[in-house]
Amino acid sequence: MQGLYLHIPFCEKKCVYCDFYSIESTDLMEGFVGRLCTELSLRATTEKPCTSIFFGGGTPSLLSPTQLERILDRVHAGYSIAPDAECTMECNPGTVTLENLKAYRSMGINRLSFGVQSFVAEELSFLARIHSADDADKAMELARAAGFDNVNMDLMFALPPQTLASLGYSIDRMLALGPDHISAYSLIFEPGTPLYAQWKKGHVHPHAEDLDAEMYAYVMDRLGAAGYEQYEVSNFARNGRTCLHNLTYWHADPYIAVGPSAHGLLDNTRYWNHRSLAAWGAKIDAGVLPQANTEVLDRHAQLVEYAFLHMRADGLPVQAAQQRFGIDLRRALQPQLQHWIDAGMVRDTGNTLRLTRDGYTVCDDITVALLDALDRASASATT
Amino acid sequence: MQHFRNFCIIAHIDHGKSTLADRLLERTGRVTKREMVYNQILDDNPLEQERGITIKLHAIQMAHKDADGNEYCLNLIDTPGHVDFSYEVSRSLSACEGALLVVDATQGVEAQTISNLFMAIDQGLEIIPVINKIDLPSAVTTIDNVKQQVIDLIGCKEEDMILASAKAGIGIDEILDAVVKRIPPPTGDPKKPLRALIYDSIFDSYRGVIVNVRVFDGVLREKDKILFMATGQQYDVDEVGVLHMQRHRTGELSAGDVGYFTAAIRRLQDTKVGDTVTLSGNRCASAIEGFREVKPMVFSGIYPADSDDFEDLREALGKLTLNDSAITFEPESSTALGFGFRCGFLGLLHMEIVQERLEREFNQVIVTTVPNVRYRVVTTKGEELWVDNPAQLPNPTLIESLEEPFIRAQIISPTEYIGAIMKLCIDRRGVMLGQTYLSADRVDMTFELPLAEVVFDFYDKLKSNTRGYASLDYEYSDYKSGDLVRMDILLNGDQVDALSSIVHRQKAHEWGKKLCVKLKELIPRQMFEVAIQAAIGSKIIARESISAIRKNVLAKCYGGDISRKRKLLEKQKEGKKRMKQVGRVEIPQEAFLAVLSID
């Protein structure tokens, strides 16, 4: 598996909680598209087929069909793309048109991801979203009409104005639209965002841990009951429609990334591009890779990433870990593993050690204990 | 010998002892102004300078010419200023014929000063009262009162007192003249067999132990074969000399002299403070009186934070005892903390100093347990046991009697705090033995208290309840039996041995409750509920519980978050490594000192 990520750093209006790099100067898009094409050429490789392409942002649906076509042409020219590759575009439900969606579909985009977040007007305005609840209904209708049979919707919970009842309402409305995939996140107060500043000033308050936990459990229960299988802390899929691209991250598989602030992983080396459009663009104009830095992952770092990423997603594969790192997980993780299994937090599926609903809730604690156990196991293996 | 004067300075912390010593050295030309830049020359240990206290003894020889042009050799023997080291103080007093009693003109006499003063008077020393810091503006209103306190205390005349300011250099010449005129020269017979008192010894990695002595009779020469009378050890003397700013070799020390010698001694324990040095071939008739073995009074477990560092810690403790023979340490193990050492200290300050030295000078990361005293147990079989680790107290059914050490505490304070002090001491199971007024507004109170009650923050409480005005001194008295019980702490049913304590039965409930509440604050929530229980035997006397973590997961983790998240998790994992584990419960190291932070 290998992914290709393209970061489109433009939004009509930034949301208060978002810490991804994006700017509101959409007039710079045309110049950006040209440079993005140049970066695609600079990084071009056909060594391995890409099994997924992901347009993230920002708001990639601000790209005109012509701009998208230019980018995709360059992708196909420089990279080998698997015939059944998943090709996702993030869309703002407020800015899609049937015409554009049809054009995207015809160019090979086969999966859409809508940042719906909530169906309650007060919550949407709290988040400074530009769309309405009805826009979300409409967007889904257009997506299906344009021929998309693989659609994700993002949902947020633990929003300060949200209650369990209003969360239930949003879930009802979302399930009624029948998305193939749902990403449901607990709101994070990220440093550097307006939301974070509001919190520090005492203007907004995160929910108490108990309510946050209750909402999370409620989300997992409702989506589970509706036939969505949880395969990551915040991700649920119906009919096996997991997001292949995100699974690339969570399985510690390689991915190429282009665009300002984009992070890639190739040959056990992480690289990250300059965050600002200007710094990124200047490097490209100078004909060099626009990356700010790289980090080579040693074996220990590889193991840590492999373990924590799998653990928070669809489970640690026992055999694969043995092959790649020579570690017998079932032995290395004792006695904690048995405690977790007894407490109903982890399930041994035979192939994987996988978090349950209760396990996902305390994923970070389990992960820290897991890493500690792996340290001890590798220490005793070397002595 | 007529031109020798041996003296020391008795003063409370902060009353200006070290500054005065520095000034005397400067005036006699022993140090130059330039050397004075780094103030307080005698306190050469950085810890001493930070805390403003003298821990180890020092001595220095100065030359002084009086008005008639006679040359005198003055030996100033500095003394430690804390109650933990009162034995060392008594030994250094024995090496002198006189003492400067330094009292702060704005503060008055303090408990520490009084006990040392009485020790000096008992030993027949000539006392020269010095009222220091007279240049402080507030001294105008307090000085008469302070003078009266001193007069009442030692029965001197007002004109006997020297008014001085060490800081401003006022009264320094008068002090030097008084030392020469009022302190008698040493007596002793150089022709008698050698009889010298060890008042201090320090370890030098090149020359071995450097022994500081006061010679009473006879002469100590290089190449002499000497005998330490208490330890029975014999050595050949290498080097003999006196102490200026550095050691100054003279080849011999005669009766009345204060100086040092070396003899390739590798163990500080062989040169016990208070021991008598004599010649092995020509012994003196009797040892100098007053020697006793210094016994540790306060004990605590010291464990490496990372159990892999046990051997490093052993080595560090070993090195530390080279220049601090008062520490004792023995290996012990704890189910909670792994392998470590049970260490004995002279007192609480000594314990703190040792812990700090281990961390600063030896780079050890340590976990210490709550300090406790040593208990005397007589079993039903009639055996006597000394227990310095509460976890090792035998089962109550096997105990015939259980005794704990008591102290006599002297507290001097402005009278307005009498009520607060009474309350504190009674809360700590104290009994008042006496009370005298030093002046209309100053009282001297004596209490008998269990040492165990003083070990826990007594001094801090005394200070805070009297806005810093009360001063404390104490001496060990006796072992007395008490209605004591061992209180254990259980986490999810598992006993945490390092948190066991021995408490008075009547206080056990309240204490247990407070300790459980404190532990609830200090132990982070875990993935499961944690029950904290305090128990006496099998009886639970207090209980708290820590609810399980409800949710701990970061919702988002995409391509750009992975490095950051990995580092965050690794940091959390390192934090986890520093936790100690009992059963499945992880306990942060601070929790082992929880008792000390209970109000």
Image (tube, coloured by chain):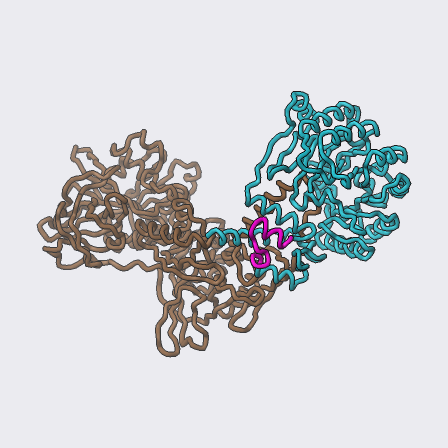
Chain colours: A cyan, B brown
Q: Nearer the viewer, residue A288 or A214?
A: A288
Q: Quadrant of the N terminus of chain B?
A: top left
Look at 57% across and 66% down and name the residue there: B533
Judge whether A235 appears above or below A74 on screen: below
Q: Is residue A322 magenta?
A: yes
Q: Position of residue B215 (x, y in %)?
A: 17, 49
Q: Position of residue B481 (x, y in %)?
A: 40, 71
User: Is A23 placed left or right of B389 in the picture?
Assistant: right
Q: Quadrant of the C terminus of chain B?
A: bottom right
**Is residue B143 in view from this perspective?**
no
Judge whether B337 appears above or below B43 on screen: below
Q: Nearer the viewer, residue B440 or B226?
A: B226
Look at 51% across and 67% down and name the residue there: B488
Residue extending furthest top? A286
Q: Which residues are magenta?
A: A317-333
Q: Position of residue B142 (x, y in %)?
A: 42, 43
Task: Label the magenta part by its dominant secondary structure.
Answer: helix
Look at 50% across and 67% down and name the residue there: B487
Q: Is residue A340 magenta?
A: no
User: Is A140 placed left or right of A29 in the picture?
Assistant: right
User: Is A113 placed left or right of B18 in the picture?
Assistant: right
Q: How many marks?
A: 0
**Is residue B278 in view from this perspective?**
yes
Residue extending furthest bottom? B381
Q: Nearer the viewer, residue B101 or A295?
A: A295
User: Is A142 placed left or right of B288 in the picture?
Assistant: right
Residue extending furthest left? B191
Q: Position of residue B28 (x, y in %)?
A: 25, 34
> Where is residue B559, by image quadrant?
top right
